[in-house]
Image: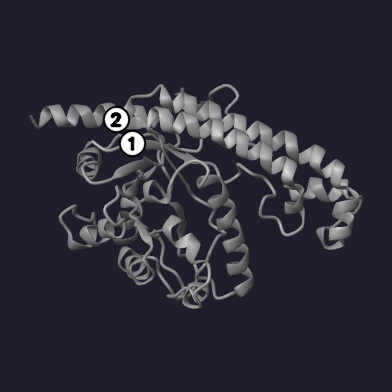
């Protein structure tokens, strides 16, 4: 069995509510709060000179949150390390380094703050290496590198480099991915066509979508074609495909072979979720309870890691793990 993992949070799901484990909350710093510290009302009034004039106040606001987040990640990884070894897969929150990719406030990450970041990331890496934890990350839905708007693509690449910064200090590109959707209108990637950002390619994966686009639809077939064209890994989301098409993709389908091939001999990461109200519901359920889905998904654990997208987080992972083990026993 490959690994089963959870998304961004650890803790217990009790009586329909998820409670994070102590000291594992990843927080953020809002743009509005930083603007206020600059003594103006709008981000449009903020200039590089104004940022420098208020550098200490901005740093005093940002630095404690960055430190809190990196310590929270350490506690999250410790929590994961105490789960069964087959559950040592974890998605790191995109909020880990607030303002790192902001066009104005990113300068707060000066040499001193970056040294702190690197020290605390190395602390996390020691836990990852010691316990064989596979980590991955998933920038938010606003990162669209196949957008027809250059401004959106530029901002997206800046965010991807932020993720690359912390990921390359925790793991290597062959073991993971920085995963995004192709939610834009283009069936190609202009910057990669121009030979730009080639250093990102080993880190990226593109995930199939569960909705039809106005111009480009990120179906399994379309997403896979883009991945193959640019030498980028494809992350197959089992539920997105089902929600879009009403069909489950057989593990024996040639498309699965092609998806696995994009990982170039390394173990792929795939996503599993269950519709909340019905099988094709796009909203995630609390747990993976459908016995047919558990049996279907368990086959994919022979070829890939499965990241469980469920509201119960680590509770859902542990429950799914025990159900898969029982499924294996039943087939002996």
- Expressed as whole percent of the image width and height from the top left, the position of residue 89 reads 39, 36
The answer to whether marks 2 and 1 mark residues whose Cβ atoms lie closer than 8 Å is: yes
Q: Which residue is mark 1?
A: 4
Seen in the picture, residue 116 relative to 177 is either above or below; the reply is above
What number is the disc on residue 321?
2
Q: CA distance from mark 2 to mark 1?
A: 7 Å
Q: Quadrant of the C terminus?
A: top left
User: Would you say 100 lies left or right of 3 here?
Assistant: right
- Expressed as whole percent of the image width and height from the top left, the position of residue 173 reads 42, 51
Mark 2 Cα-neighbour bin, 10 Å: few <14, some 14–19, many ≥20: many
Residue drawn where x is 61% and y is 68% of the image:
154
Q: Is residue 82 visible?
A: yes
User: Would you say 115 lies left or right of 108 here?
Assistant: left
In the image shown, does 23 or 185 lie closer to the viewer? Answer: 23
In the image shown, does 116 or 39 lie closer to the viewer? Answer: 116
Element under disc 1: strand
Q: Is residue 28 visible?
A: no
- Expressed as whole percent of the image width and height from the top left, the position of residue 295 reads 20, 39
Q: Quadrant of residue 275?
A: top left
Q: Quadrant of residue 115?
A: top right
* Mark nearer the viewer, 2 or 1: 1
* Residue furthest left as drawn: 332
Seen in the picture, residue 184 relative to 15 is either above or below; the reply is below
Element under disc 2: helix
Counting labels gives 2
User: Would you say 37 lies left or right of 14 here?
Assistant: right
Residue drawn where x is 64% and y is 71% of the image:
151
Residue drawn where x is 55% and y is 60% of the image:
143
């Amino acid at each position: 069995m490959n690994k089963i993992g959870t998304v961004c949070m650890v803790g217990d799901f009790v009586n329909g509510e998820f409670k994070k484990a102590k000291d594992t909350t990843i927080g953020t710093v809002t743009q509005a709060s930083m603007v206020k510290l600059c003594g103006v009302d709008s981000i449009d009034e903020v200039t590089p000179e104004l940022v420098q004039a208020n550098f200490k106040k901005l740093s005093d606001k940002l630095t404690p949150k960055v430190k809190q987040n990196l310590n929270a990640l350490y506690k999250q990884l410790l929590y994961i390390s105490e789960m069964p070894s087959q559950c040592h897969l974890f998605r790191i929150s995109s909020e880990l380094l607030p303002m790192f990719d902001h066009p104005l406030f990113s300068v707060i990450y000066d040499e001193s703050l970056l040294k702190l970041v690197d020290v605390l990331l190395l602390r996390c890496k020691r836990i990852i290496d010691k316990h064989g934890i596979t980590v991955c990350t998933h920038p938010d839905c606003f990162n669209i590198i196949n957008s027809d708007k250059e401004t959106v693509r530029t901002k997206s690449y800046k965010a991807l480099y932020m993720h690359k910064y912390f990921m390359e200090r925790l793991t290597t590109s062959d073991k993971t991915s920085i995963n995004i959707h192709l939610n834009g209108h283009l069936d190609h990637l202009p910057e990669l066509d121009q030979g730009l950002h080639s250093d990102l390619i080993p880190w990226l994966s593109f995930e199939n979508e569960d909705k039809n686009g106005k111009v480009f639809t990120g179906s399994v077939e379309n997403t896979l074609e883009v991945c193959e064209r640019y030498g980028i890994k494809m992350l197959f989301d089992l539920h997105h495909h089902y929600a879009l098409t009403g069909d489950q993709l057989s593990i024996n389908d040639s498309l699965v072979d092609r998806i696995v091939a994009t990982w170039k001999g390394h173990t792929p990461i795939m996503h599993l979720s269950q519709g909340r109200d019905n099988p094709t519901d796009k909203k995630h359920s609390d747990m993976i309870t459908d016995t047919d889905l558990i049996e279907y998904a368990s086959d994919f654990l022979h070829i890939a890691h499965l990241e469980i997208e469920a509201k119960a987080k680590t509770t859902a992972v542990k429950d799914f793990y025990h159900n898969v083990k029982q499924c294996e026993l039943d087939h002996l």
